[in-house]
Amino acid sequence: MRLHLPPPIKLLIKLAVSACILILLVRGIAWNEFLKTLRSAHPLWLTWAAGWFALSKYLSASRFLTLVRIDVPQFGFRENLILYWKGMYYNLLLPGGISGDAYKMKALREQAGMTVPLLIRLVLADRISGVIALVQWAALLLLLIPGAGIPAPYVWMLLLFTLLMPLFFLYFVRRAYQPCRLRLAAYSLAVQSAQLAAAAGLVFAVGQEQHLVAYLALFLGSSLATLIPFTIGGAGARELVFMYGAPWVGGQVEPAVAIGFLFYLISTGISLLGIFLVFHHNRPPHANN
């Protein structure tokens, strides 16, 4: 039997988990070294990271539009971009990691006439496509890390599985999405590539380029952790993965956590741009006529 918890209880649980993560981070790093790393971060590389992150969101919005246009061919790119950025803002504004998806579903239902079952399938196809590309990149990076502790044959099997999965999962989610599976896969790989470029910039910003491949693998693992809505907006989850993962890949804890924290600041800052869209577009975006 599935356990249904009232929203206030869910919020309290997430607050408790977030507090526990914060305590672990406070006790697990040397704050003087951490703050020193943040202060010494190179601004040019931070700008590089911000630019690539913004591009990754632009590509994510394009992937989302590919699915929307299956049912609403006239849905405009500008309207979709506004809708997507508003969703990013609501992910920060409201507790949990799916608030943005809920907003996009509500807007598309009201303005484009899409039904709830179709919207659920749309969001699932969009999310799963992204996760598949993320796991593919993670498998490739694991093959480049000597002594990662995972036998290479298992990593190759995982990579093969993720290459075959797009042939099947869209069939079960919704057959109408099958013709665009290659486009979805291409967008998803491009999204993850842009985010990896952003993360690489942060690795260089804190002077840890000797651990570049290892930290990029940790970054992908931390991205998977943020998909699980057990904290408020994913706060702390990425940093926790970096803190415990850095010794495993031969890195230093404080610079690793700084990379996760800087990425959180960049993603938060760019997502907050959606506040201007909220105030300047009173109604949810709609399809072009």
Image (spheres, rainbow, N blue to C red):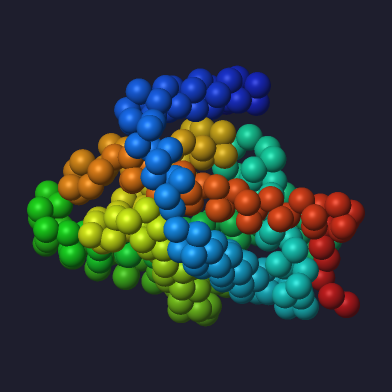
User: Above or below — where is 94 with respect to 155?
Assistant: above
The image shows a total of numbered marks equal to 0
- Left of 200 or right of it: where is 180? right
**Residue at 49% over, 65% down:** 44
Of the pair 124 and 195, the residue shown nearer to us: 195
Image coordinates of residue 257 in percent, x first then y, are 37, 42
**Residue at 23% over, 59% down:** 210
Image coordinates of residue 187 in percent, x first then y, are 50, 73
User: Above or below — where is 212 with respect to 9?
Assistant: below
Of the pair 71 and 277, the residue shown nearer to us: 277
User: Above or below — where is 224 with respect to 129?
Assistant: above
Of the pair 160 and 97, the residue shown nearer to us: 97
- Left of 194 or right of it: where is 288? right
**Residue at 45% over, 27% down:** 22
| Residue 94 visible at all | yes
| Residue 6 visible at all | no
**Residue 108 placement: quadrant:** bottom right
**Residue 122 placement: quadrant:** bottom right
Image coordinates of residue 191 in percent, x first then y, are 48, 68
- Left of 227 or right of it: where is 145? left
Question: Looking at the rendering, in which quadrant would you find the C terminus?
Answer: bottom right
User: Above or below — where is 184 with respect to 271?
Assistant: below
**Residue at 84% over, 75% down:** 288
**Residue 198 placement: quadrant:** bottom left
- Left of 230 or right of it: where is 25? left
Image coordinates of residue 51 in percent, x first then y, are 55, 67
